Image: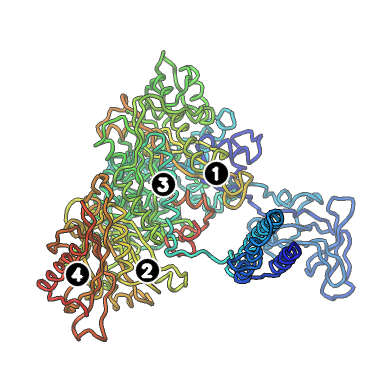
C-alpha cells in the first residue's frame, strides 16, 4: 500500500519526523517496508548563473559562475550549450548523489576547478511529464523564480515521500488512502474526520439508460452503479494526475482516472462501461456459459469456466467480474454514456478465477482481500462527485443498486474482564471505550460489557466466539504491546523432555559425527529421471513416490523415496569442488504412496563414504560402530542383498535381531556415472524407527574374570565360498570345555602356498575358565576340538 | 706409606675428573678400590705394621676410600645425567608438528546445532517434543487452523499439493491441531520439522526449510506470558544482552498476534546491511491462539487458552552465524560445514 506523505497531510497535522511516523505505525501493527522520496537525489540545489566564460583550454566547454545562496559563488565547468547568464539551473554540489547512485565530486577539468555539475532532467530522473523542459537534451532550465540555494526538490515541487506500508490480510479496509489515514491519524493521536461525499442528484433517472440484473447474488452481494451522459473525455487535472502517479498509476483520461482514483482513495475497485457497447444497456451478472470466451481490456482472450462470474449484456460477456473489463466495452474517445460500477464480488470466487486465468489485476487483488457493500455505494457516489467536479459529463439521477445483503450496522458485545485476561491488563471498560473511539469505533461500557457498534469497513471484527479476542487485539495495539510487562507462566510445573525418538536421533547423529561424518541436509524433492537412474526394477517399493500436483518442474515433482540420490549429489558437488571430505550422513524423511490417505513416512539414516582409504568395509565398520554405540553389540548381522543401485557382489542387508533394518553397498558404476561422482562410492541407508525398535538391553554388571585368559590364533585353509560368518559361527559353537570368547577374523590370505580356489583365514580368540587357570592340556584339547569342528563342517585344514 | 695413600688419592681424583664414560669409572673403581686395587693393596699390607701405625694409617686409608667412593658416585651420577641429556637432545620433537588423528571428527550441520539449542532452551522451560508428518491433511494444515478454503490468508503461503485434501505442510502448525486432538491439556509442546513453500530458490528463499513451533495450552495464559517465554527463550539462544521488540501483527492462527524482533546480532542495533539500517531483525511470529482453532479441535476456548509461536530454524541459524545466502545450508559443501 503506497501512502504519499502529501496525501496523508490532507487528513492529518503531520508534526513528526518520517522515522517517528514509521515507528508509531509499527506499534499499531502497520509495518513500513520503505520510505521512498519522490525525487531520490541529495545535495542538489538551485543555482543562478551570474557569469559565463569560455574555458581557456577547451573550445566546447564553458565555465559558469553560480550563485548558490552562499557568500561565495561556485565555479562549474559544463559542456552543455543551452545555458545562459541569469539562468536558474539544478546544481549538484560536491558529494551530491544523483539517480542511480551516481556521485558528483569537485574535480579539475582541463586546468579549471569545477565544484560540481549542472544537471539535466535525465540526471535527476525526471521527464517532461514531471516538469516542463525536463525532457530536453541539455541542462534543465528552471521555471519561475526559485531562490538560489533552495533544495531542488522544493524548486521542482517534488518534495513528497511515499511510505510503502505492508498490510496484514485482516485489514483490507486499509488498502485505501482513507482507511490508512484513519489509522495514521489515530497513531498521531489526532481525531479523524471521515471526508464527506457531496451528493450529486443529477437529472433524469439512470433506469432510462441502464438496468442491472444479478443472477448469482451469492457471488455478487451488491452491484451499485450510476450513469453519466454527454461524456467529455479529456486528460484529468494536474492534481489528480500527480496523485495517481505518486501511487504508481498511469493517468489515461478523466473517466478512467476517476475510477482509479476512487479505487486508491476508497479501496473499492470500480469499472466504467461504455453503455453504447452494452446491448440494451442491460447488465447481467452471471456465471460463464460452457466454453465462453471473453476478451479483456488488455486484448487477451480468456477461456472461461462455468464457475467464473461474468459481467454480460444479453448477448455477450463484457468483462470478467472483479478481474478486468472487456475490450468490447472499453472507454474510448467516442464514448457518450458511461456506467460507473462499484460491486462486491465474493473473494473466494475471484481468487479461484484469477488462479485459473493466471491473471491478478490490482482490482482482483483487492476483491480477494475483501471489499464490503457499504463502501461500494460510497465509492460510486464519490466517483460521481468527481465527475461533477471535473465536469467530465452530465450526471444522471438515481443509483442503480442491486443488493442482497444486510448493510445495517452490526453491534457486538465484548467481555471486558475476558479481554483483560487475554492481555494481562486491567483496563476499565470506560477507558477501553475511549481507546476504541480513537479509531472511530463507537463503544459503550455497560458494566463489564462493551457494546460495540462495528464500522462497516471493519469486517474483521466478528460477532462470534472470536469477539473478545478481536477486541483484545484492538485494545492491545491501542494500549501498546510495549506497555504489557512480560510474565512467566504460573501454575502446574511440567517435566520437559525430549521424546524417545528425538533422543535416539540425537544419539545417532552424535555417533556419526564421532565416526567422522559431516551432516547433510538435502531437499526432499526428486524426479522420475532420478528413480530411473537408480535402475529400480518394476514394482520396487522406491518407485511408489508421492507426486506433487504443482511442482517447480519434472525433476522436482516427486517426494524422495530414498536418501541415496541426494547423498550422491552432495558427494559429486564435494568431489568437484575438491573439498577433501570423504564421509557424509543425513537423517531425513522419505515417503511412499501406499494408497492410504496420507503417504507412509519413514525417517532414514543415510551414510556415504568415498575416496582414499574408503571401501565397503570402512563403511561397514562405521555401521558396526554405530550399532555398538546404540547398545546393539552382538545383535546385528549382514546378509548379501540390497538395491539395484549397488554393485552386485558388494551389497548387503543389515539385520538386527534377524530383522532387516537397512542396506549397504558399493554404488553401481553406472549409477555413479549418472550422478557424476568421479570415484568409487559406498552408501548405506537404515530405517531409524525399525532400528530403534530394537532396544538396547538394560546393562547389568558382569564380574571381571578371576583367572587369566589365554589368547590363541589359528589359520585355516577353506574353499573360497566359505564366508567369514560361517567360520566364526563354527569356532564359537565348537564343543570345547572352556570359555571361548572374542573370536575375530584378522587376516585373509590367497596366493603362494595356498591352492587355487582356496583361501587362508586367520582368527584370534581367547580361552579361559571360570574356576581355574588353564593348563596346556586344557588348551590343546580346546584347539583340537575347534579344528575338528572346522574340518567336519567346512572342510577346513589347519594352514601348515 | 702416608705418602703413597696421598698419591693414590691425588691420582684417582685426577682420573675421576677426566673420566667421560661409565666404563672408565668402572675401571678406576677396580684399579683403586677393587679387590686388587691400589688402595686395597695398601690396606692389605697394613698387617705388617705395628698397632699404632696401623691405626693411624687405617684411619687415613679408610677416609680416602670413603672420599673416593663418594666422588665416584657423584661422577657416576653426573655422567648418567649427561648421557640422558644427550639422549633427550637426540629425541627432541618438533612439538608444533600436527597431532595424529586416526579418525577426524565429523560435523553436525549448523541447523541441527541451532535446532538443539532452541529445543533445549524450551525443554528447560518444561516443553516436550512432539512431531507430525511432513505430508499433511489440508484440514490440519489450514482448515482447522482458522484458514478455511478460499481464505485470503491462504495466499500468504504458497502450497505444494499432493491432491485436493493433502499438502506438503507449509508450517509446523498442523501439529497444533494434532496435539489438541490427541494430548490432554494442559501441555507445553515444542514441534520441530521440515516445512515446504512454493518459493523459488534464491539467497533468502528455499522451498524446504525447518521450523519449530512452541505451543502451550493451559487454563490461564496471556499475551504477557507469551512475552515472558519469548524473552527467556531469546536470551537463551542469542545471549542476555540482546533486546526484544514485541509488536502487533496478524496471523490467522492467533489473536492478538505479534511479530518479534531482536536487536541486530551483527551491528548490535546501530543499523547495518543485515538489519537494513533498522537495528532490528525479525525472528518469529506468535500470539494467543485463535479460539476457532481450539473450537475446531473440540477444546472449549472459554476454559482453555493457548499461546503459540513459530521460528524458522534456518533463519535463526543465518542470523546467529551471519550467513547471507540460505542456499549454503542445503549445498552441504564440506568447507561450509566444517566451520561450525
Q: Residue A747 location, x and y as percent?
A: 28, 73
- Which residue position is annotated with label 3? B116
- Residue A57 lies left or right of residue B185; in this view the side is right
Q: Find residue B204 and name its label.
A: none
Nearest-to-viewer mark from 2 and 3: 3
- Which residue position is annotated with label 4? A640
Disc 2 is attached to a residue of which chain? A
Residue B312 visible here? yes
Marks 4/2: CA–CA distance: 26 Å
Identify the mark nearer the N-term, 2 or 1. 1
Nearest-to-viewer mark from 3 and 1: 3
* A348 versus A795 height, above or below: above
Mark 4 and mark 2 residues within 8 Å of each other at the beta carbon: no
Q: Residue A750 location, x and y as percent?
A: 25, 82
- Which residue position is annotated with label 2? A569
* A641 versus A265 height, above or below: below
Amino acid at each position: 500500500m503506497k501512502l504519499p506523505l502529501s496525501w496523508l497531510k490532507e487528513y492529518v497535522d503531520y508534526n513528526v519526523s518520517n522515522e517517528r511516523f514509521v515507528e508509531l505505525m509499527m506499534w499499531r501493527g502497520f509495518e513500513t517496508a520503505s520510505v521512498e522520496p519522490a525525487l531520490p537525489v541529495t545535495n542538489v540545489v538551485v543555482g543562478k548563473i551570474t557569469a559565463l566564460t569560455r574555458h581557456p583550454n577547451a573550445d566546447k566547454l564553458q565555465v559558469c559562475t553560480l550563485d548558490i545562496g552562499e557568500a561565495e559563488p561556485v565555479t562549474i565547468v559544463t559542456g552543455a550549450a543551452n545555458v545562459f547568464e541569469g539562468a536558474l539551473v539544478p546544481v549538484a554540489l560536491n558529494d551530491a548523489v544523483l539517480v542511480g547512485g551516481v556521485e558528483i565530486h569537485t574535480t579539475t577539468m582541463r586546468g579549471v576547478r569545477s565544484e560540481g555539475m549542472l544537471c539535466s532532467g535525465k540526471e535527476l530522473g525526471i521527464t517532461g511529464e514531471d516538469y516542463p523542459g525536463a525532457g530536453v537534451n541539455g541542462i534543465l532550465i528552471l521555471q519561475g523564480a526559485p531562490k538560489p540555494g533552495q533544495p531542488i526538490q522544493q524548486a521542482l515541487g517534488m518534495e513528497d515521500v511515499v511510505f510503502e506500508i505492508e498490510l496484514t490480510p485482516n485489514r483490507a479496509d486499509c488498502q485505501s488512502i482513507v482507511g490508512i489515514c484513519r489509522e495514521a491519524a489515530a497513531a498521531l493521536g489526532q481525531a479523524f474526520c471521515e471526508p464527506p461525499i457531496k451528493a450529486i442528484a443529477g437529472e433524469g433517472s439512470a433506469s432510462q439508460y441502464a438496468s442491472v440484473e444479478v443472477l448469482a447474488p451469492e457471488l455478487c452481494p451488491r452491484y451499485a452503479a450510476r450513469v453519466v451522459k454527454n461524456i467529455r473525455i479529456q486528460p484529468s487535472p494536474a492534481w489528480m494526475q500527480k496523485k495517481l502517479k505518486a501511487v504508481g498509476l498511469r493517468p489515461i483520461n478523466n473517466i478512467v482516472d476517476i475510477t482509479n482514483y476512487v479505487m486508491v482513495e476508497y479501496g473499492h475497485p470500480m469499472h466504467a462501461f461504455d453503455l453504447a457497447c452494452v446491448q440494451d444497456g442491460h447488465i447481467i451478472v452471471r456465471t460463464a456459459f460452457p466454453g465462453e470466451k471473453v476478451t479483456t481490456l488488455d486484448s487477451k482472450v480468456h477461456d472461461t469456466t462455468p464457475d467464473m462470474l461474468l459481467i454480460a449484456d444479453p448477448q455477450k460477456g463484457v468483462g470478467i467480474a472483479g478481474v478486468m473489463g472487456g475490450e468490447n466495452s472499453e472507454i474510448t474517445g467516442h464514448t457518450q454514456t458511461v456506467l460507473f460500477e462499484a460491486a462486491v464480488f465474493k473473494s473466494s470466487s475471484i481468487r479461484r478465477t484469477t488462479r485459473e486465468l493466471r491473471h491478478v489485476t490490482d482490482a482482483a487483488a483487492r476483491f480477494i482481500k475483501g471489499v464490503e457493500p457499504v463502501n461500494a455505494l460510497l465509492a460510486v457516489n464519490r466517483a460521481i462527485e468527481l465527475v461533477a467536479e471535473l465536469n467530465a459529463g452530465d450526471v444522471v439521477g438515481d443509483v442503480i443498486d442491486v443488493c442482497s445483503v444486510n448493510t445495517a450496522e452490526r453491534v457486538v458485545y465484548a467481555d471486558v474482564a475476558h479481554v483483560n485476561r487475554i492481555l494481562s491488563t486491567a483496563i476499565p471498560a470506560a477507558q477501553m471505550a475511549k481507546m476504541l473511539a480513537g479509531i472511530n469505533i463507537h463503544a459503550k461500557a455497560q458494566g463489564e460489557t462493551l457494546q460495540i457498534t462495528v464500522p462497516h469497513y471493519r469486517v474483521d471484527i466478528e460477532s462470534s466466539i472470536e469477539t473478545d479476542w478481536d477486541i483484545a487485539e484492538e485494545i492491545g495495539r491501542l494500549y501498546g504491546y510495549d506497555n504489557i510487562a512480560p510474565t512467566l507462566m504460573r501454575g502446574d510445573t511440567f517435566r520437559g523432555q525430549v521424546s524417545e525418538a528425538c533422543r535416539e536421533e540425537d544419539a545417532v547423529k552424535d555417533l556419526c559425527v564421532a565416526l567422522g561424518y559431516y551432516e547433510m541436509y538435502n531437499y526432499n524433492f526428486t524426479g522420475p529421471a532420478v528413480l530411473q537412474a537408480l535402475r529400480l526394477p518394476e514394482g520396487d517399493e522406491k518407485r511408489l513416490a508421492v507426486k506433487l500436483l504443482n511442482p517447480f518442474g519434472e525433476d522436482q515433482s516427486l517426494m524422495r523415496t530414498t536418501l541415496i540420490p541426494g547423498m550422491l549429489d552432495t558427494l559429486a558437488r564435494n568431489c568437484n569442488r575438491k573439498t577433501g571430505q570423504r564421509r557424509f550422513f543425513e537423517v531425513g524423511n522419505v515417503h511412499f504412496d501406499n494408497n492410504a490417505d496420507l503417504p507412509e513416512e519413514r525417517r532414514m539414516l543415510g551414510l556415504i563414504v568415498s575416496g582414499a582409504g574408503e571401501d565397503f568395509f570402512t563403511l561397514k565398520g562405521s555401521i558396526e560402530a554405530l550399532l555398538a554405540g546404540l547398545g546393539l553389540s552382538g545383535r546385528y548381522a549382514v546378509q548379501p542383498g540390497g538395491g539395484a543401485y549397488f554393485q552386485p557382489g558388494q551389497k548387503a542387508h543389515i539385520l538386527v535381531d534377524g530383522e532387516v533394518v537397512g542396506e549397504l553397498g558399493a554404488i553401481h558404476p553406472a549409477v555413479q556415472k549418472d550422478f557424476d561422482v568421479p570415484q568409487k562410492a559406498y552408501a548405506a541407508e537404515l530405517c531409524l524407527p525399525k532400528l530403534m525398535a530394537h532396544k538396547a538391553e538394560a546393562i547389568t554388571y558382569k564380574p571381571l574374570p578371576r583367572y587369566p585368559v589365554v589368547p590363541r590364533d589359528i589359520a585355516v585353509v577353506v574353499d573360497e565360498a566359505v564366508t567369514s560368518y560361517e567360520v566364526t559361527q563354527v569356532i564359537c559353537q565348537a564343543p570345547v570345555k572352556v570359555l571361548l570368547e572374542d573370536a575375530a577374523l584378522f587376516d585373509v590370505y590367497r596366493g603362494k602356498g595356498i591352492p587355487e580356489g582356496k583361501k587362508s583365514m586367520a582368527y584370534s580368540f581367547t580361552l579361559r575358565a571360570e574356576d581355574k587357570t588353564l593348563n596346556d592340556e586344557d588348551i590343546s584339547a580346546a584347539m583340537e576340538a575347534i579344528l575338528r569342528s572346522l574340518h567336519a563342517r567346512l572342510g577346513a585344514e589347519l594352514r601348515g | 706409606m702416608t705418602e703413597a695413600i696421598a698419591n693414590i688419592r691425588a691420582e684417582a681424583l685426577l682420573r675421576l675428573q677426566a673420566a667421560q664414560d661409565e666404563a672408565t669409572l668402572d675401571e678406576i673403581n677396580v684399579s683403586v678400590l677393587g679387590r686388587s686395587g691400589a688402595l686395597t693393596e695398601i690396606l692389605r699390607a697394613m698387617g705388617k705394621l705395628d698397632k699404632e701405625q696401623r691405626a693411624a694409617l687405617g684411619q687415613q686409608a679408610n677416609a680416602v676410600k670413603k672420599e673416593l667412593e663418594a666422588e665416584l658416585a657423584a661422577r657416576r651420577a653426573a655422567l648418567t645425567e649427561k648421557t640422558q641429556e644427550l639422549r633427550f637432545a637426540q629425541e627432541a620433537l618438533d612439538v608444533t608438528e600436527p597431532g595424529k588423528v586416526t579418525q577426524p571428527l565429523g560435523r553436525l550441520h549448523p541447523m541441527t546445532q541451532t535446532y538443539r539449542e532452541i529445543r533445549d532452551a524450551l525443554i528447560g522451560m518444561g516443553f516436550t517434543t512432539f512431531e507430525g508428518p511432513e505430508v499433511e491433511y489440508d484440514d490440519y494444515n489450514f482448515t482447522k487452523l482458522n484458514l478455511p478454503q478460499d481464505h485470503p490468508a491462504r495466499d500468504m503461503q504458497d502450497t505444494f499439493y499432493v491432491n485436493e485434501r493433502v499438502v506438503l505442510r507449509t508450517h509446523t502448525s498442523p501439529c497444533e491441531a494434532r496435539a489438541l486432538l490427541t494430548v490432554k491439556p494442559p501441555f507445553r509442546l515444542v514441534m520441530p520439522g521440515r516445512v515446504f513453500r512454493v518459493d523459488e530458490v534464491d539467497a533468502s528463499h528455499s522451498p524446504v526449510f525447518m521450523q519449530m513451533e512452541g505451543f502451550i495450552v493451559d487454563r490461564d495464559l496471556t499475551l504477557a506470558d507469551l512475552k515472558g517465554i519469548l524473552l527467556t527463550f531469546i536470551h537463551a539462544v542469542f545471549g542476555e544482552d540482546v533486546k526484544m521488540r514485541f509488536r502487533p501483527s496478524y496471523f490467522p492462527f492467533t489473536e492478538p498476534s505479534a511479530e518479534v524482533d531482536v536487536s541486530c546480532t551483527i551491528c548490535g542495533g546501530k543499523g547495518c546491511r543485515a538489519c537494513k539500517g533498522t537495528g532490528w531483525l525479525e525472528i518469529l511470529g506468535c500470539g494467543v491462539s485463535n479460539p476457532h482453532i481450539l473450537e475446531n479441535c473440540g477444546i472449549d476456548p472459554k476454559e482453555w487458552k493457548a499461546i503459540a509461536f513459530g521460528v524458522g530454524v534456518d533463519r535463526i541459524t543465518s542470523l546467529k552465524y551471519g550467513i547471507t545466502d540460505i542456499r549454503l545450508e542445503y549445498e552441504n559443501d564440506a568447507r561450509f560445514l566444517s566451520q561450525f
